[in-house]
Image (cartoon, coloured by chain):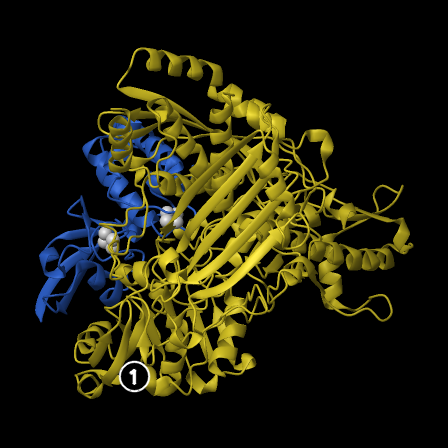
Chain colours: A yellow, B blue
């Protein structure tokens, strides 16, 4: 396969403008909510107003008699048909995994949980009829606090489980399970730093609300859904609802953002399928933003207890991590796996000799958590990068020096970390040097000193984040060893059409990542066909018959390589046809720039388009060869990929108002080989916005009774253009050695690196005041209070 | 039901609507103008922005009856009519600056940007950022959106300088 990929014709690496834009900028997009089928009905969902309550009575009679209503259904009505929603990642054999009904049956466990539905002629009638559903709740005390939930005698989210603890998962570099190595390191240390950080709960808040259309006509079920995972969804829906898999087709048309938030088998999809099956008519459900914020899964929400040990010269000797991870009320598709992914990233880019990670998953009466941009890895990177700054402060060292002292140097790759991953390649020095220079690190430090000396009310802070992440969530064997219930390969096929145009089918299902463009670039280079002659097909289980979908920065690193493999197979077959046509041996045929030639005889050539036609016509093919030129390939990488980089942030913090302003943000990311720099920059920008949002703006807040206080965009506030600065984004390029494209993935880098960079900068500005932590998001109020507390403490 | 007559993207539509119908639902469901989308229920996201008599409005906060007798421009009518395949400078700029990823916020973003440029043909970066404050994008981090608006502004100013003809806003 390398032979093919090393024949570049220049598309890969070019800043190609995106193919998909043509329809997106003209409003010709096919969002799920745009779909209108003849006779289509509409569904609306009644949701629990309480965090925890027994349902003592549901009466849908009045609702079902309202004008336009076709059916009104409760959880009880569907009880026999709805299997438990799936969790595909049982991280320990004894993990507590309570039933997760799509429609609550006898108890509700978070505010926003679906309890009944109405199917009606139009959306307004369906919504109107919800009010006529009578439900009696017997309220129960909500379990909201993670620590309290784990205490003896706590109220239980799932009474039958007898505990609020779902699992405890341990990774220990020392003797299994004893924690001996790290405890010894901590006991013997010249310096130790201990901190407790809160990863606040976030909401993915993709811009397109979730939407689903189901057409049950003729006993064949077609579901259109705003999902990241049409293939996984189809299998899971068939298991949960008993719909035979071959009678079910799932289509993800244009999808308006996901960020992990649409990596789910949702109750809404299950209910829509069951309801459509009941009424025998196509129906549509589209959530409101308020429903989305309360009932689509949330992200993060961890308590991190961290203990770091080091020598006086800054060398780290041990790192101990105790995590409590909030599962919410139920387990979603990969809920328990999220903190486990993080376990492998707490050592980041550093050589840490002793490491122990222990995570307890806990149930509370909140929306369940699951993957959100970075999934486990931003939480880990935040912890270790904050701790590097705290260690530097403890030692009176420059925080960059502490990092340099501990990181894996360029010559040491491949490097196996204390958590057991093997980083194939990287060059932390190069990325850091470039970032420092672009940022003007020394000048900013001088300005910082000056402001400190002058007692300037606006203090300057400098934040560093040197990160890596495990991307390309795939290696099936590795995922299997982590108890993940599926493999991670990806599929692609190439169809050479008789006219020489090419259809590439990919199992990866995009929602803004630009697959149409990047895949066309890859195919154009591999097959030597014009960029515009390539059409990319995806997101429909009937055309893209196999796939593992899109999450974890795996599209290019896994799906893109599958495309390369499929191209390789086409070229192989075409070569045989060419040899037959040119009357020479296959070994004498060489392929380049779309043409097959006899080695050493210029002038003899057959273009790939001619071969495609000949293979289609099939009048004169080598004996035993099948007609048509196409291929099928999967790719299952041997290892994850490890992009890395250095992010630097300068903040101005107003010590009188608590306001934080990002003065400059510079990042140098190394994502390996770049297929399309335009797309890479765009992904980095978007990631930065999300990571900065965690640092400064966003938090999902429940009150003590379990009511979501941030249930609209008035209260949950993703940043607008006015809240963010412009970024300087540059790159170094250290190719991955484990895939033929040399690519590493970029979807999550910005998010992972930026949160600690910003918070480090905020704390750095305030450190002279005796402040060493500000809880996220570092809102003006939080910063101001931290300053007041510090002043109070000093007085 | 109330009879209303609205000109949308150059075509006049006469329809009966329920008084409670929002303009965005009228556009999407009755007229099939699905280029305009709904992203929130609190008038915060800007995804539904259209031009009403040339002024940017969030069509989820306008009743269809309020549009009676008026002119609406949606993303589908943004490009000059009759020139198949041609894009409005704003659409071209969004494409060329890679100012969109999933594209869900894009129609509303472009309409809001057109409104902004109609009022301030030469905005600074800060003015663009503040002018688009009512439109949320979760994918792009806004940097390329700002660049696109700057570039469209330059082109539109050039067009205005070079011609006395009315430029579609
Ligand atoms: S849908 Fe109109 S502002 Fe969000
Ligand atoms: S491009 Fe996806 S929300 Fe803006």
Q: Residue extending furthest front?
A: A187
The residue pinned by badge 1 equals A73
Asked if residue A698 can be seen in this view, the reply is yes
Whether residue A795 is situated above or below residue A686 in the rendered picture: above
Percent of width and height locating residue A466: 54, 33
Q: Nearer the viewer, residue A708 or A610?
A: A708
Percent of width and height locating residue A222: 46, 76
In this rendering, position of residue A748 left or right of residue A579: left
Q: Quadrant of residue A351?
A: top right
Screen quadrant of the C terminus of chain A: top left
In this rendering, position of residue A338 left or right of residue A104: right
Q: Residue at x 15, y 58 (%)?
A: B6
Q: Nearer the viewer, residue A250 or A434?
A: A434
Per the image, label 1 sits on a secondary structure element best described as strand
Whether residue A576 is situated above or below residue A771 in the rendered picture: below
Q: Nearer the viewer, residue A19 or A259?
A: A259
In the rendered picture of this protein, how many numbered marks are placed on residues?
Answer: 1
Q: Residues within 10 Å of mark 1 (few under 14, many from 20)?
A: many
Asked if residue B139 can be seen in this view, the reply is no
Percent of width and height locating residue A760: 42, 31
């Amino acid at each position: 396969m390398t032979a093919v990929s090393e024949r570049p014709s220049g598309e890969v690496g070019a800043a190609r403008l995106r193919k998909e834009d043509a329809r997106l900028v003209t409003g010709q997009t096919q969002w799920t909510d745009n779909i209108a089928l003849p006779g289509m009905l509409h569904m609306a969902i009644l949701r629990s107003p309480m965090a925890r309550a027994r349902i003592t009575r549901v009466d849908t009679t009045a609702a079902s008699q309202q004008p336009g209503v076709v059916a009104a259904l409760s959880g009880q009505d569907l009880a026999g048909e709805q299997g438990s929603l799936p969790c595909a990642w049982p991280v320990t054999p004894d993990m507590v995994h309570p039933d997760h009904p799509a429609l609550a049956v006898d108890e509700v466990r978070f505010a926003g949980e679906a309890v009944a539905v109405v199917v009606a002629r139009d959306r307004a009638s369906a919504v109107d009829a919800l009010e006529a559903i009578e439900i009696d709740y017997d309220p129960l005390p909500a379990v909201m606090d993670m620590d309290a939930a784990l205490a003896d005698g706590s109220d239980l989210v799932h009474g039958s489980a007898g505990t609020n603890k779902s699992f405890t998962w341990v990774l220990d570099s020392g003797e299994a399970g004893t924690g001996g190595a790290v405890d010894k390191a901590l006991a013997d240390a010249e310096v130790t730093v201990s901190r407790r950080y809160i990863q606040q709960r976030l909401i993915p808040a993709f811009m397109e609300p979730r939407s689903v259309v189901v057409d049950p006509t003729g006993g064949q079920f077609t579901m259109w859904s705003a999902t990241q995972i049409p293939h996984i969804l189809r299998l899971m829906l068939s298991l949960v609802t008993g719909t035979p898999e071959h009678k079910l087709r799932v289509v993800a048309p244009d999808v308006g953002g996901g960020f992990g938030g649409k990596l789910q088998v949702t109750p809404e999809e299950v209910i829509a399928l069951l309801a459509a099956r009941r009424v025998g008519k196509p129906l549509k459900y589209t959530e409101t933003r308020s429903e989305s914020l309360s009932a689509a899964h949330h992200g993060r929400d961890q308590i991190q207890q961290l203990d770091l040990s080091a020598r006086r010269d800054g060398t780290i000797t041990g790192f101990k991590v105790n995590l409590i991870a909030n599962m919410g009320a139920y387990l979603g598709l990969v809920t328990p796996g999220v903190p486990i992914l993080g376990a492998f990233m707490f050592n980041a880019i550093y050589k840490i000799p002793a490491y122990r990670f222990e995570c307890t998953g806990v149930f509370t009466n909140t929306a369940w958590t699951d993957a959100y941009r970075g999934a486990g890895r931003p939480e880990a990177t935040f912890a270790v990068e904050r701790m590097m700054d705290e260690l530097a402060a403890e030692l009176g060292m420059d925080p960059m020096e502490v990092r340099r002292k501990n990181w894996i140097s360029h010559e040491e790759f491949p490097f196996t970390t204390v958590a057991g991953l093997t980083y194939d390649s990287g060059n932390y020095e190069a990325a850091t040097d470039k970032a420092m220079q672009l940022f003007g690190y020394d000048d900013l430090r001088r300005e910082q000193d000056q402001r400190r000396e002058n007692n300037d009310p606006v203090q300057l802070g400098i934040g560093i984040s040197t990160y890596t992440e495990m991307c390309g969530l795939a290696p099936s064997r590795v995922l299997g060893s982590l108890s993940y219930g599926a493999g991670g390969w990806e599929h692609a096929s190439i169809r050479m059409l008789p006219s020489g145009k090419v259809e590439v089918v990919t199992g990866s299902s995009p929602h803004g990542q630009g697959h149409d463009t990047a895949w066309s670039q890859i195919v154009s280079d591999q097959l030597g066909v014009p960029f515009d002659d390539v059409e990319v097909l995806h997101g429909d289980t009937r055309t893209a018959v196999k796939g593992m979908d899109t999450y974890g920065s795996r599209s290019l690193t896994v799906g893109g390589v599958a495309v390369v493999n499929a191209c390789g197979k086409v070229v192989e077959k075409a070569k045989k046809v060419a040899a037959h046509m040119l009357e020479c041996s296959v070994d004498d045929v060489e392929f380049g720039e779309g043409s097959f030639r006899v080695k050493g005889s210029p002038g003899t050539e057959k273009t790939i388009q001619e071969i495609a036609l000949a293979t289609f016509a099939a009048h004169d093919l080598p004996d035993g060869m099948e007609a048509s030129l196409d291929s099928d390939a999967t790719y299952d990488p041997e290892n994850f990929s490890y992009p890395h980089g250095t992010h630097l942030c300068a903040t101005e913090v107003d010590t009188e108002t608590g306001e934080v302003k990002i003065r400059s943000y510079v990042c140098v990311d190394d994502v390996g080989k770049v297929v399309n720099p335009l797309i890479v920059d765009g992904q980095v920008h978007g990631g930065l916005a999300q990571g900065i949002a965690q640092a400064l703006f966003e938090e999902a807040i429940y009150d003590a009774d379990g009511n979501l206080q941030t249930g609209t965009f008035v209260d949950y506030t993703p940043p607008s253009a006015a809240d963010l600065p412009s970024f300087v984004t540059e790159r170094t390029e250290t190719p991955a050695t484990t895939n033929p494209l040399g690519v590493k993935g970029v979807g999550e880098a910005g998010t992972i690196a930026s949160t600690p960079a910003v918070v480090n900068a905020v704390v750095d500005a305030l450190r002279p005041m005796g402040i060493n932590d500000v809880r996220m998001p570092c809102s003006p109020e939080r910063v101001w209070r931290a300053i007041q507390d510090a002043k109070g403490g000093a007085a | 039901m109330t009879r209303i007559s609205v000109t949308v993207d150059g075509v006049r539509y006469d329809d009966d609507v329920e008084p409670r119908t929002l303009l965005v639902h009228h556009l999407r469901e009755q007229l099939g103008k699905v280029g305009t989308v709904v992203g929130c229920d609190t008038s915060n996201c800007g995804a539904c922005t259209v031009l009403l008599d040339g002024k940017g409005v969030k069509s989820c906060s306008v009743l269809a009856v309020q549009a009676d007798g008026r002119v609406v421009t949606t993303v589908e009518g943004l490009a000059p009519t009759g020139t198949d395949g041609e894009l409005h400078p704003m659409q071209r700029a969004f494409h060329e600056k890679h100012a969109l990823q999933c594209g869900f916020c894009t129609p509303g973003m472009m309409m809001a940007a057109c409104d902004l440029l109609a009022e301030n043909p030469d905005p600074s970066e800060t003015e663009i950022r503040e002018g688009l404050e009512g439109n949320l994008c979760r994918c792009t981090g806004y940097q390329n959106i700002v660049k696109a608006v700057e570039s469209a502004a330059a082109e539109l100013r050039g067009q205005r300088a070079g011609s006395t003809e009315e430029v579609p806003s």
